[in-house]
Image: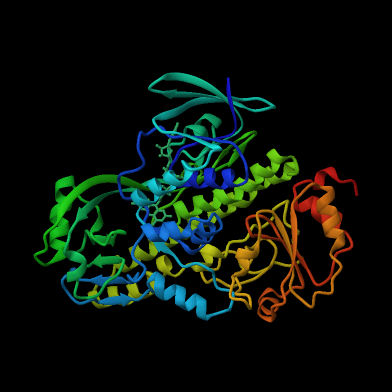
Amino acid sequence: METTQVLVVGAGPVGLTLAIDLAQRGVAVLLVEKNATSIQLPKMERCNARTMEIFRRLGIADAVRAAGLPRDVPMDVFLAPSMAGDALVHLPYPSVAAAKATIAANNDGRPLEPYQLISQYTLEPLLRAIVEEYPNIDVRFACEMTSFDQDADGVTAELRSAGGTQRVRAAYIVGCDGGASTVRKQLGIALNGQGSIRTLRQALFYSDELFDRIPMGKGRHYHIVKPPIFPFIIIQDSTKHWTLHAAAESDEEMTTIFRDALGMDVAFETLSVNQWTQHLLCADRYRDGRAFIAGDAAHLVIPTGGLGMNTGVGDATDLAWKLAATLAGWGGPALLDSYEIERRQIGLRNVAASGNAMSGRNTWRAAPTVDEMAARFDAEQRKVTEILGIEAGYRYVGSPIVCEEPGDGPDPNNNAYVPTTWPGFRLPHVWLEDGTPIHDRLGAGYTLLEVGRGTQDTSAFIEAFAAAGTPLDVQHIASPVARAIYDAELILIRPDLHVVWRGATMPADAARITATVTGNAALVRS
Ligand SMILES: Cc1cc2nc3c(=O)[nH]c(=O)nc-3n(C[C@H](O)[C@H](O)[C@H](O)COP(=O)(O)OP(=O)(O)OC[C@H]3O[C@@H](n4cnc5c(N)ncnc54)[C@H](O)[C@@H]3O)c2cc1C
Protein backbone atom coordinates (compact mmCIF):
# COMPACT_ATOMS: atom_id res chain seq x y z
CA MET A 1 0.00 0.00 0.00
CA GLU A 2 1.17 3.52 -0.80
CA THR A 3 2.31 5.48 2.28
CA THR A 4 2.76 9.11 3.21
CA GLN A 5 3.23 11.05 6.43
CA VAL A 6 0.26 13.42 6.29
CA LEU A 7 -2.81 13.00 4.10
CA VAL A 8 -4.39 16.42 3.55
CA VAL A 9 -7.96 16.21 2.24
CA GLY A 10 -9.08 19.24 0.23
CA ALA A 11 -7.04 21.71 -1.83
CA GLY A 12 -8.93 24.85 -0.87
CA PRO A 13 -6.85 27.71 0.54
CA VAL A 14 -6.46 26.00 3.92
CA GLY A 15 -5.35 22.59 2.62
CA LEU A 16 -2.95 24.26 0.19
CA THR A 17 -1.42 26.45 2.92
CA LEU A 18 -1.10 23.49 5.28
CA ALA A 19 0.61 21.43 2.57
CA ILE A 20 3.15 24.22 1.89
CA ASP A 21 3.92 24.69 5.60
CA LEU A 22 4.32 20.94 6.17
CA ALA A 23 6.49 20.55 3.08
CA GLN A 24 8.78 23.38 4.17
CA ARG A 25 9.23 21.49 7.44
CA GLY A 26 10.31 18.38 5.53
CA VAL A 27 7.09 16.39 5.89
CA ALA A 28 5.87 14.13 3.07
CA VAL A 29 2.33 15.17 2.13
CA LEU A 30 -0.35 13.62 -0.04
CA LEU A 31 -2.87 16.35 -0.92
CA VAL A 32 -6.10 15.15 -2.54
CA GLU A 33 -8.82 17.31 -4.07
CA LYS A 34 -12.04 15.86 -5.39
CA ASN A 35 -12.57 18.60 -7.98
CA ALA A 36 -10.60 18.52 -11.22
CA THR A 37 -9.73 22.22 -11.02
CA SER A 38 -9.33 24.93 -8.41
CA ILE A 39 -12.38 27.05 -7.59
CA GLN A 40 -13.76 29.14 -10.46
CA LEU A 41 -16.30 31.13 -8.45
CA PRO A 42 -15.58 34.16 -6.30
CA LYS A 43 -15.68 33.58 -2.55
CA MET A 44 -13.18 35.25 -0.25
CA GLU A 45 -11.28 38.23 -1.48
CA ARG A 46 -9.33 39.63 1.46
CA CYS A 47 -6.32 38.06 3.13
CA ASN A 48 -6.01 39.85 6.46
CA ALA A 49 -2.84 41.16 8.11
CA ARG A 50 -2.12 37.94 10.00
CA THR A 51 -2.62 35.75 6.94
CA MET A 52 -0.19 37.98 5.04
CA GLU A 53 2.36 37.64 7.86
CA ILE A 54 1.94 33.87 7.64
CA PHE A 55 2.35 34.00 3.86
CA ARG A 56 5.48 36.12 4.35
CA ARG A 57 6.97 33.44 6.60
CA LEU A 58 6.17 30.86 3.95
CA GLY A 59 7.96 33.09 1.42
CA ILE A 60 4.86 33.58 -0.73
CA ALA A 61 3.55 37.02 0.30
CA ASP A 62 5.13 38.81 -2.67
CA ALA A 63 3.62 36.32 -5.11
CA VAL A 64 0.19 36.75 -3.50
CA ARG A 65 0.48 40.54 -3.69
CA ALA A 66 1.66 40.43 -7.31
CA ALA A 67 -1.43 38.41 -8.25
CA GLY A 68 -3.81 40.50 -6.14
CA LEU A 69 -5.39 43.94 -6.31
CA PRO A 70 -2.82 46.50 -7.56
CA ARG A 71 -0.95 48.02 -4.64
CA ASP A 72 -2.15 51.58 -5.18
CA VAL A 73 -5.91 50.87 -5.16
CA PRO A 74 -7.55 52.11 -1.95
CA MET A 75 -9.66 49.76 0.16
CA ASP A 76 -12.35 52.36 0.93
CA VAL A 77 -15.89 51.45 1.90
CA PHE A 78 -18.90 53.45 0.75
CA LEU A 79 -22.59 53.80 1.44
CA ALA A 80 -24.28 55.42 -1.54
CA PRO A 81 -27.64 55.67 -3.33
CA SER A 82 -26.03 54.14 -6.43
CA MET A 83 -22.61 53.66 -7.98
CA ALA A 84 -23.24 56.83 -9.98
CA GLY A 85 -23.98 59.11 -7.05
CA ASP A 86 -22.10 60.77 -4.24
CA ALA A 87 -21.33 58.78 -1.13
CA LEU A 88 -23.53 59.16 1.92
CA VAL A 89 -20.71 57.72 4.01
CA HIS A 90 -17.11 57.24 2.93
CA LEU A 91 -14.81 55.20 5.17
CA PRO A 92 -11.27 55.52 3.83
CA TYR A 93 -8.87 52.57 4.17
CA PRO A 94 -5.38 52.70 2.71
CA SER A 95 -4.15 50.92 -0.37
CA VAL A 96 -1.46 48.29 0.23
CA ALA A 97 1.18 50.80 -0.87
CA ALA A 98 -0.06 53.43 1.59
CA ALA A 99 -0.49 50.89 4.39
CA LYS A 100 3.04 49.57 3.83
CA ALA A 101 4.42 53.12 3.96
CA THR A 102 2.64 53.68 7.29
CA ILE A 103 3.96 50.41 8.70
CA ALA A 104 7.48 51.32 7.53
CA ALA A 105 7.24 54.74 9.18
CA ASN A 106 6.08 53.45 12.56
CA ASN A 107 7.87 51.23 15.02
CA ASP A 108 5.13 50.71 17.55
CA GLY A 109 4.42 46.99 17.38
CA ARG A 110 1.68 47.11 14.74
CA PRO A 111 1.49 44.07 12.41
CA LEU A 112 4.23 43.76 9.80
CA GLU A 113 2.02 43.15 6.79
CA PRO A 114 -1.20 44.89 5.72
CA TYR A 115 -4.12 43.09 4.14
CA GLN A 116 -4.20 42.05 0.51
CA LEU A 117 -7.27 41.80 -1.66
CA ILE A 118 -7.00 38.73 -3.88
CA SER A 119 -9.95 36.79 -5.23
CA GLN A 120 -10.20 33.18 -4.14
CA TYR A 121 -10.28 32.12 -7.82
CA THR A 122 -6.84 33.78 -8.19
CA LEU A 123 -5.37 32.67 -4.85
CA GLU A 124 -6.19 28.97 -5.14
CA PRO A 125 -4.50 28.37 -8.53
CA LEU A 126 -1.51 30.40 -7.30
CA LEU A 127 -1.17 28.27 -4.17
CA ARG A 128 -1.69 25.15 -6.26
CA ALA A 129 1.18 26.16 -8.58
CA ILE A 130 3.39 26.71 -5.51
CA VAL A 131 2.39 23.34 -4.03
CA GLU A 132 3.26 21.61 -7.27
CA GLU A 133 6.85 22.84 -6.96
CA TYR A 134 7.51 20.81 -3.82
CA PRO A 135 8.95 17.33 -4.39
CA ASN A 136 7.58 16.17 -1.02
CA ILE A 137 3.97 17.10 -1.85
CA ASP A 138 2.09 14.63 -4.01
CA VAL A 139 -0.94 16.63 -5.16
CA ARG A 140 -3.82 14.88 -6.88
CA PHE A 141 -6.85 16.68 -8.26
CA ALA A 142 -9.98 14.74 -9.32
CA CYS A 143 -9.22 12.44 -6.41
CA GLU A 144 -11.77 12.08 -3.61
CA MET A 145 -11.15 10.72 -0.14
CA THR A 146 -14.24 8.57 0.44
CA SER A 147 -13.56 6.97 3.84
CA PHE A 148 -10.82 6.23 6.34
CA ASP A 149 -10.05 4.10 9.40
CA GLN A 150 -7.47 4.72 12.06
CA ASP A 151 -5.53 2.53 14.45
CA ALA A 152 -2.77 3.17 16.97
CA ASP A 153 -0.11 3.60 14.28
CA GLY A 154 -1.81 5.46 11.48
CA VAL A 155 -4.70 6.05 9.14
CA THR A 156 -5.82 4.05 6.13
CA ALA A 157 -7.88 6.02 3.62
CA GLU A 158 -9.71 5.10 0.47
CA LEU A 159 -9.26 7.40 -2.52
CA ARG A 160 -11.45 7.41 -5.59
CA SER A 161 -10.32 8.83 -8.93
CA ALA A 162 -10.85 8.10 -12.63
CA GLY A 163 -8.34 5.28 -12.33
CA GLY A 164 -10.47 3.49 -9.71
CA THR A 165 -10.17 3.21 -5.93
CA GLN A 166 -6.97 2.97 -4.00
CA ARG A 167 -6.00 2.66 -0.33
CA VAL A 168 -3.25 4.78 1.17
CA ARG A 169 -1.63 4.75 4.57
CA ALA A 170 -0.63 7.93 6.46
CA ALA A 171 0.54 8.75 9.96
CA TYR A 172 -2.08 11.54 10.16
CA ILE A 173 -5.06 12.80 8.18
CA VAL A 174 -6.22 16.43 8.13
CA GLY A 175 -9.65 17.29 6.79
CA CYS A 176 -9.40 20.67 5.06
CA ASP A 177 -12.43 19.58 3.13
CA GLY A 178 -14.77 22.49 3.70
CA GLY A 179 -18.18 22.92 5.26
CA ALA A 180 -19.50 19.51 4.16
CA SER A 181 -16.30 17.84 5.44
CA THR A 182 -16.21 14.08 4.90
CA VAL A 183 -13.52 13.80 7.58
CA ARG A 184 -15.61 15.64 10.18
CA LYS A 185 -18.73 13.65 9.38
CA GLN A 186 -16.93 10.35 9.48
CA LEU A 187 -15.54 11.24 12.90
CA GLY A 188 -19.08 12.05 14.07
CA ILE A 189 -18.08 15.56 15.10
CA ALA A 190 -21.06 17.90 15.35
CA LEU A 191 -21.19 21.56 14.35
CA ASN A 192 -22.85 23.83 16.88
CA GLY A 193 -24.31 27.30 16.59
CA GLN A 194 -26.67 28.79 14.02
CA GLY A 195 -26.85 26.94 10.70
CA SER A 196 -28.59 27.99 7.49
CA ILE A 197 -29.32 31.54 8.64
CA ARG A 198 -29.98 32.97 5.20
CA THR A 199 -29.33 32.09 1.57
CA LEU A 200 -28.04 34.79 -0.75
CA ARG A 201 -27.07 34.99 -4.37
CA GLN A 202 -23.66 36.11 -5.53
CA ALA A 203 -23.01 37.19 -9.10
CA LEU A 204 -19.74 37.87 -10.87
CA PHE A 205 -19.65 40.60 -13.50
CA TYR A 206 -16.99 41.83 -15.90
CA SER A 207 -16.78 45.47 -16.87
CA ASP A 208 -13.96 47.19 -18.68
CA GLU A 209 -15.07 50.65 -17.69
CA LEU A 210 -16.81 50.61 -14.29
CA PHE A 211 -13.67 51.04 -12.18
CA ASP A 212 -12.70 54.23 -14.01
CA ARG A 213 -16.18 55.70 -13.94
CA ILE A 214 -17.19 55.63 -10.27
CA PRO A 215 -17.49 59.29 -9.27
CA MET A 216 -17.49 58.80 -5.48
CA GLY A 217 -14.01 57.25 -5.54
CA LYS A 218 -12.11 54.00 -5.83
CA GLY A 219 -12.62 51.44 -3.15
CA ARG A 220 -13.41 47.92 -2.19
CA HIS A 221 -16.98 47.77 -0.87
CA TYR A 222 -19.99 49.69 -2.17
CA HIS A 223 -23.21 49.33 -0.15
CA ILE A 224 -26.14 50.62 -2.16
CA VAL A 225 -29.14 52.14 -0.37
CA LYS A 226 -31.91 50.36 -2.21
CA PRO A 227 -34.07 48.70 0.44
CA PRO A 228 -35.06 46.00 0.99
CA ILE A 229 -32.33 44.40 -1.14
CA PHE A 230 -29.36 46.62 -0.25
CA PRO A 231 -27.13 45.44 -3.12
CA PHE A 232 -23.55 44.97 -1.94
CA ILE A 233 -20.87 45.34 -4.62
CA ILE A 234 -17.27 44.20 -4.10
CA ILE A 235 -14.29 44.87 -6.32
CA GLN A 236 -12.26 41.84 -7.33
CA ASP A 237 -8.49 41.78 -7.83
CA SER A 238 -8.41 42.62 -11.56
CA THR A 239 -10.47 45.83 -10.96
CA LYS A 240 -12.50 44.65 -13.98
CA HIS A 241 -14.43 41.98 -12.10
CA TRP A 242 -17.11 42.79 -9.55
CA THR A 243 -19.30 40.68 -7.33
CA LEU A 244 -22.81 41.50 -6.20
CA HIS A 245 -24.41 39.99 -3.10
CA ALA A 246 -28.16 40.21 -2.82
CA ALA A 247 -31.18 38.20 -1.75
CA ALA A 248 -32.63 37.84 -5.26
CA GLU A 249 -35.51 35.64 -6.31
CA SER A 250 -33.71 34.27 -9.37
CA ASP A 251 -30.32 34.22 -11.06
CA GLU A 252 -31.63 36.50 -13.81
CA GLU A 253 -32.72 39.10 -11.27
CA MET A 254 -29.09 39.59 -10.21
CA THR A 255 -28.29 41.27 -13.52
CA THR A 256 -31.25 43.62 -13.10
CA ILE A 257 -30.24 44.46 -9.53
CA PHE A 258 -26.67 45.18 -10.65
CA ARG A 259 -27.78 47.45 -13.50
CA ASP A 260 -30.10 49.30 -11.16
CA ALA A 261 -27.36 49.66 -8.51
CA LEU A 262 -24.96 51.08 -11.08
CA GLY A 263 -27.34 53.94 -11.85
CA MET A 264 -25.39 54.80 -14.99
CA ASP A 265 -24.94 53.36 -18.41
CA VAL A 266 -21.92 51.10 -18.05
CA ALA A 267 -21.22 48.09 -20.27
CA PHE A 268 -20.87 44.82 -18.34
CA GLU A 269 -21.21 41.11 -18.77
CA THR A 270 -22.69 38.64 -16.26
CA LEU A 271 -20.21 35.79 -15.84
CA SER A 272 -21.80 33.62 -13.17
CA VAL A 273 -24.45 33.50 -10.46
CA ASN A 274 -24.43 31.10 -7.53
CA GLN A 275 -26.09 30.74 -4.17
CA TRP A 276 -24.45 30.53 -0.78
CA THR A 277 -25.81 30.14 2.72
CA GLN A 278 -24.81 31.95 5.85
CA HIS A 279 -23.84 29.90 8.90
CA LEU A 280 -22.31 30.66 12.30
CA LEU A 281 -21.08 27.24 13.36
CA CYS A 282 -18.10 25.71 15.13
CA ALA A 283 -17.18 22.04 15.51
CA ASP A 284 -17.39 20.41 18.94
CA ARG A 285 -13.96 18.87 18.46
CA TYR A 286 -11.08 19.49 16.08
CA ARG A 287 -9.35 16.16 16.60
CA ASP A 288 -10.00 12.49 16.98
CA GLY A 289 -6.83 10.44 17.45
CA ARG A 290 -4.78 10.80 14.29
CA ALA A 291 -7.44 12.78 12.44
CA PHE A 292 -7.77 16.57 12.53
CA ILE A 293 -10.04 19.13 10.92
CA ALA A 294 -9.10 22.67 9.89
CA GLY A 295 -10.64 25.62 8.07
CA ASP A 296 -14.29 25.53 7.03
CA ALA A 297 -14.41 21.87 8.03
CA ALA A 298 -14.11 23.13 11.64
CA HIS A 299 -15.86 26.52 11.58
CA LEU A 300 -18.29 28.31 9.31
CA VAL A 301 -18.68 32.06 9.60
CA ILE A 302 -20.61 34.72 7.74
CA PRO A 303 -18.03 36.37 5.48
CA THR A 304 -18.81 39.82 6.94
CA GLY A 305 -15.50 40.63 8.63
CA GLY A 306 -13.56 38.25 6.38
CA LEU A 307 -12.84 35.68 9.07
CA GLY A 308 -13.47 32.51 7.07
CA MET A 309 -10.36 31.56 5.18
CA ASN A 310 -8.24 33.76 7.39
CA THR A 311 -9.19 31.73 10.47
CA GLY A 312 -8.47 28.55 8.51
CA VAL A 313 -4.99 29.76 7.53
CA GLY A 314 -4.41 30.31 11.26
CA ASP A 315 -5.45 26.70 11.91
CA ALA A 316 -3.03 25.50 9.24
CA THR A 317 -0.06 27.38 10.62
CA ASP A 318 -0.81 26.15 14.15
CA LEU A 319 -1.11 22.52 13.11
CA ALA A 320 1.76 22.29 10.60
CA TRP A 321 4.68 22.68 12.99
CA LYS A 322 3.04 20.47 15.62
CA LEU A 323 2.60 17.62 13.14
CA ALA A 324 6.13 18.13 11.83
CA ALA A 325 7.57 18.16 15.35
CA THR A 326 5.67 15.01 16.31
CA LEU A 327 6.81 13.23 13.16
CA ALA A 328 10.39 14.39 13.80
CA GLY A 329 10.22 12.78 17.22
CA TRP A 330 10.81 15.74 19.53
CA GLY A 331 7.21 16.94 19.79
CA GLY A 332 5.54 15.49 22.86
CA PRO A 333 1.88 14.42 23.07
CA ALA A 334 0.67 17.79 24.38
CA LEU A 335 1.68 19.45 21.09
CA LEU A 336 -1.07 17.76 19.10
CA ASP A 337 -3.44 17.98 22.08
CA SER A 338 -2.95 21.74 22.07
CA TYR A 339 -4.22 22.15 18.49
CA GLU A 340 -7.89 21.82 19.43
CA ILE A 341 -7.47 23.77 22.69
CA GLU A 342 -5.80 26.68 20.91
CA ARG A 343 -7.68 26.82 17.66
CA ARG A 344 -11.21 25.94 18.77
CA GLN A 345 -11.30 28.94 21.11
CA ILE A 346 -10.31 31.11 18.14
CA GLY A 347 -12.95 29.42 15.98
CA LEU A 348 -15.63 30.18 18.58
CA ARG A 349 -14.35 33.73 19.03
CA ASN A 350 -14.30 34.41 15.30
CA VAL A 351 -17.75 32.92 14.78
CA ALA A 352 -18.93 35.38 17.46
CA ALA A 353 -17.02 38.27 15.85
CA SER A 354 -18.62 37.48 12.47
CA GLY A 355 -22.05 37.41 14.09
CA ASN A 356 -21.25 40.76 15.68
CA ALA A 357 -20.13 42.20 12.33
CA MET A 358 -23.31 40.90 10.68
CA SER A 359 -25.59 42.33 13.35
CA GLY A 360 -23.86 45.69 12.87
CA ARG A 361 -24.78 45.53 9.21
CA ASN A 362 -28.38 44.60 10.01
CA THR A 363 -28.58 47.55 12.42
CA TRP A 364 -27.79 50.19 9.82
CA ARG A 365 -29.94 48.51 7.20
CA ALA A 366 -32.93 48.73 9.59
CA ALA A 367 -32.61 52.52 10.09
CA PRO A 368 -35.88 54.43 9.59
CA THR A 369 -34.33 57.34 7.64
CA VAL A 370 -31.39 57.77 5.28
CA ASP A 371 -29.70 60.18 7.71
CA GLU A 372 -30.04 57.71 10.53
CA MET A 373 -28.78 54.95 8.23
CA ALA A 374 -25.68 56.97 7.40
CA ALA A 375 -25.02 57.64 11.09
CA ARG A 376 -25.44 53.98 11.99
CA PHE A 377 -23.34 52.86 9.01
CA ASP A 378 -20.49 55.07 10.14
CA ALA A 379 -20.47 53.37 13.54
CA GLU A 380 -21.52 49.80 12.75
CA GLN A 381 -19.58 49.14 9.56
CA ARG A 382 -16.37 49.57 11.51
CA LYS A 383 -17.16 46.27 13.26
CA VAL A 384 -16.49 44.70 9.85
CA THR A 385 -13.44 46.65 8.76
CA GLU A 386 -11.68 47.75 11.95
CA ILE A 387 -11.05 44.50 13.79
CA LEU A 388 -7.27 44.19 13.61
CA GLY A 389 -7.26 42.87 17.19
CA ILE A 390 -9.50 39.98 16.17
CA GLU A 391 -7.38 39.33 13.09
CA ALA A 392 -3.88 39.52 14.53
CA GLY A 393 -4.27 39.91 18.30
CA TYR A 394 -5.44 36.45 19.23
CA ARG A 395 -4.11 34.66 22.27
CA TYR A 396 -4.12 30.99 23.15
CA VAL A 397 -5.65 30.86 26.63
CA GLY A 398 -5.24 27.71 28.70
CA SER A 399 -2.90 25.99 26.27
CA PRO A 400 -0.88 23.11 27.74
CA ILE A 401 2.20 24.25 25.81
CA VAL A 402 2.16 27.89 26.90
CA CYS A 403 3.59 28.94 30.28
CA GLU A 404 0.80 31.12 31.57
CA GLU A 405 1.43 34.05 33.86
CA PRO A 406 -0.68 34.85 36.89
CA GLY A 407 -3.56 37.25 36.28
CA ASP A 408 -6.10 37.69 33.54
CA GLY A 409 -3.76 39.13 30.94
CA PRO A 410 -4.80 41.42 28.09
CA ASP A 411 -8.28 40.94 26.62
CA PRO A 412 -7.98 38.28 23.89
CA ASN A 413 -11.21 39.52 22.27
CA ASN A 414 -10.28 43.16 21.78
CA ASN A 415 -11.27 44.55 18.35
CA ALA A 416 -8.27 46.87 18.55
CA TYR A 417 -4.79 45.43 18.21
CA VAL A 418 -2.59 46.01 21.26
CA PRO A 419 0.97 44.67 20.98
CA THR A 420 1.98 42.45 23.88
CA THR A 421 4.27 39.52 24.64
CA TRP A 422 1.90 38.05 27.21
CA PRO A 423 2.36 34.28 26.68
CA GLY A 424 -0.05 32.90 24.11
CA PHE A 425 -0.02 36.00 21.88
CA ARG A 426 1.98 36.20 18.67
CA LEU A 427 5.22 38.15 18.98
CA PRO A 428 4.53 41.74 17.87
CA HIS A 429 6.47 43.00 14.89
CA VAL A 430 9.34 45.41 15.54
CA TRP A 431 11.71 47.03 13.04
CA LEU A 432 15.32 46.44 14.05
CA GLU A 433 17.98 49.09 13.71
CA ASP A 434 19.24 47.69 10.41
CA GLY A 435 15.74 48.00 8.95
CA THR A 436 14.83 44.33 9.06
CA PRO A 437 11.68 43.19 10.80
CA ILE A 438 12.28 40.95 13.78
CA HIS A 439 9.93 38.31 12.33
CA ASP A 440 12.34 37.78 9.44
CA ARG A 441 15.10 36.95 11.92
CA LEU A 442 13.15 34.12 13.50
CA GLY A 443 13.83 30.66 12.11
CA ALA A 444 11.65 27.58 11.69
CA GLY A 445 12.27 26.28 15.23
CA TYR A 446 12.03 27.95 18.65
CA THR A 447 13.81 31.22 19.33
CA LEU A 448 14.98 32.57 22.65
CA LEU A 449 15.11 36.33 22.25
CA GLU A 450 17.27 38.28 24.59
CA VAL A 451 16.03 41.83 24.28
CA GLY A 452 17.91 43.54 27.05
CA ARG A 453 21.49 44.28 27.94
CA GLY A 454 22.73 40.93 26.67
CA THR A 455 24.08 39.79 30.01
CA GLN A 456 21.94 36.73 30.60
CA ASP A 457 23.43 33.26 30.75
CA THR A 458 21.06 31.35 28.48
CA SER A 459 22.96 28.07 28.61
CA ALA A 460 20.27 26.31 30.68
CA PHE A 461 17.76 26.70 27.82
CA ILE A 462 20.36 25.79 25.21
CA GLU A 463 21.20 22.60 27.09
CA ALA A 464 17.56 21.71 27.75
CA PHE A 465 16.55 22.13 24.09
CA ALA A 466 19.62 20.22 22.92
CA ALA A 467 18.80 17.39 25.32
CA ALA A 468 15.23 17.34 23.92
CA GLY A 469 16.56 17.27 20.35
CA THR A 470 14.53 20.41 19.66
CA PRO A 471 15.82 23.24 17.43
CA LEU A 472 16.49 26.45 19.36
CA ASP A 473 18.07 29.62 18.12
CA VAL A 474 19.23 32.16 20.70
CA GLN A 475 19.31 35.75 19.53
CA HIS A 476 20.36 38.89 21.28
CA ILE A 477 18.49 41.90 19.95
CA ALA A 478 19.98 45.20 21.08
CA SER A 479 16.91 47.27 20.35
CA PRO A 480 15.50 49.78 22.83
CA VAL A 481 12.25 49.79 20.85
CA ALA A 482 11.89 46.02 21.13
CA ARG A 483 12.72 46.21 24.83
CA ALA A 484 10.02 48.84 25.37
CA ILE A 485 7.32 47.11 23.33
CA TYR A 486 8.11 43.62 24.55
CA ASP A 487 8.34 44.54 28.21
CA ALA A 488 10.53 41.51 29.00
CA GLU A 489 14.23 40.67 28.88
CA LEU A 490 13.81 37.11 27.65
CA ILE A 491 11.10 35.78 25.37
CA LEU A 492 10.73 32.22 24.18
CA ILE A 493 8.94 31.97 20.85
CA ARG A 494 7.67 28.85 19.15
CA PRO A 495 7.81 28.10 15.41
CA ASP A 496 4.51 29.87 14.59
CA LEU A 497 5.74 33.04 16.38
CA HIS A 498 3.53 32.71 19.45
CA VAL A 499 5.18 33.51 22.77
CA VAL A 500 5.36 30.48 25.08
CA TRP A 501 7.30 31.97 27.98
CA ARG A 502 8.85 35.29 28.98
CA GLY A 503 10.80 36.54 31.96
CA ALA A 504 13.02 39.24 33.37
CA THR A 505 15.79 36.75 34.13
CA MET A 506 16.62 33.15 33.33
CA PRO A 507 14.23 30.78 35.11
CA ALA A 508 15.42 28.24 37.66
CA ASP A 509 13.48 25.52 35.85
CA ALA A 510 14.51 25.88 32.18
CA ALA A 511 14.27 22.12 31.68
CA ARG A 512 10.68 22.02 32.88
CA ILE A 513 9.72 25.00 30.72
CA THR A 514 11.35 23.32 27.74
CA ALA A 515 9.38 20.15 28.42
CA THR A 516 6.14 22.13 28.67
CA VAL A 517 6.54 24.16 25.49
CA THR A 518 7.60 21.12 23.44
CA GLY A 519 4.59 19.15 24.63
CA ASN A 520 6.58 16.81 26.86
CA ALA A 521 5.60 18.10 30.31
CA ALA A 522 3.68 14.95 31.21
CA LEU A 523 6.84 12.93 30.62
CA VAL A 524 8.94 14.90 33.12
CA ARG A 525 8.98 13.83 36.75
CA SER A 526 8.71 16.66 39.23
C1 LIG B 1 -19.42 34.88 -0.58
C2 LIG B 1 -18.26 34.53 0.30
C3 LIG B 1 -17.31 35.50 0.61
C4 LIG B 1 -16.23 35.20 1.44
N1 LIG B 1 -15.28 36.16 1.76
C5 LIG B 1 -14.25 35.86 2.58
C6 LIG B 1 -13.20 36.80 2.89
O1 LIG B 1 -13.19 37.93 2.40
N2 LIG B 1 -12.20 36.41 3.74
C7 LIG B 1 -12.17 35.16 4.26
O2 LIG B 1 -11.24 34.85 5.03
N3 LIG B 1 -13.09 34.23 3.95
C8 LIG B 1 -14.13 34.55 3.14
N4 LIG B 1 -15.06 33.60 2.81
C9 LIG B 1 -14.94 32.26 3.35
C10 LIG B 1 -13.92 31.45 2.56
O3 LIG B 1 -14.28 31.37 1.21
C11 LIG B 1 -13.83 30.06 3.16
O4 LIG B 1 -13.66 30.20 4.56
C12 LIG B 1 -12.67 29.27 2.57
O5 LIG B 1 -12.93 28.86 1.27
C13 LIG B 1 -12.41 28.03 3.42
O6 LIG B 1 -11.31 27.37 2.90
P1 LIG B 1 -11.11 25.82 3.17
O7 LIG B 1 -9.86 25.48 2.45
O8 LIG B 1 -11.24 25.53 4.62
O9 LIG B 1 -12.38 25.12 2.51
P2 LIG B 1 -12.89 25.14 1.01
O10 LIG B 1 -12.49 26.37 0.32
O11 LIG B 1 -14.34 24.80 1.08
O12 LIG B 1 -12.10 23.95 0.34
C14 LIG B 1 -12.40 22.62 0.64
C15 LIG B 1 -11.92 21.76 -0.51
O13 LIG B 1 -12.03 20.39 -0.15
C16 LIG B 1 -12.49 19.67 -1.28
N5 LIG B 1 -13.08 18.42 -0.77
C17 LIG B 1 -14.23 18.29 -0.03
N6 LIG B 1 -14.43 17.00 0.30
C18 LIG B 1 -13.41 16.30 -0.25
C19 LIG B 1 -13.06 14.90 -0.24
N7 LIG B 1 -13.81 14.00 0.39
N8 LIG B 1 -11.95 14.51 -0.92
C20 LIG B 1 -11.18 15.43 -1.57
N9 LIG B 1 -11.47 16.76 -1.60
C21 LIG B 1 -12.56 17.18 -0.93
C22 LIG B 1 -13.48 20.61 -1.92
O14 LIG B 1 -13.70 20.27 -3.28
C23 LIG B 1 -12.77 21.95 -1.76
O15 LIG B 1 -11.93 22.26 -2.84
C24 LIG B 1 -16.13 33.89 1.96
C25 LIG B 1 -17.08 32.91 1.63
C26 LIG B 1 -18.14 33.22 0.80
C27 LIG B 1 -19.15 32.18 0.45
Residue 494 visible in rendering: yes
**Toward which corner of the image does residue 488 lie, by quadrant?**
bottom right
Q: Nearer the viewer, residue 333 or 53?
A: 53
Looking at the image, residue 406 sits to the left or right of residue 118; the answer is right
Residue at 58% x, 38% y: name it. Answer: 292
Residue extending farthest to the left is 265
**For the image shown, how many numbered marks are present on the structure?**
0
- Looking at the image, residue 206 sits to the left or right of residue 354; the answer is left
Residue 346 falls left or right of residue 62: right
Picture quarter with ligand 1: top left
Q: Name the spot of residue 106 as percent of width and height, x first.
A: 54, 80
Q: Is residue 526 above or below residue 234?
A: above
Q: How is the image coloured?
A: rainbow
Image quadrant in which the N terminus is located? top right
Residue at the spot 44% in from the left edge and 40% down from the top edge: 11
Residue 250 visible in the current orientation: no
Q: Residue at 65% across / 60% down in the picture?
A: 498
Q: Is residue 372 above or below residue 197?
A: below
Quick check: 193 above or below 175? below
Of residues 423 and 345, the one nearer the viewer is: 423
The picture quadrant where one finds residue 173 is: top right
* Residue name at image x 80 percent, y 54 percent: 514
| Relative image position of residue 335 (x, y in whole percent) | 70, 46
Where residue 179 sits in the image (x, y, percent)?
A: 43, 41
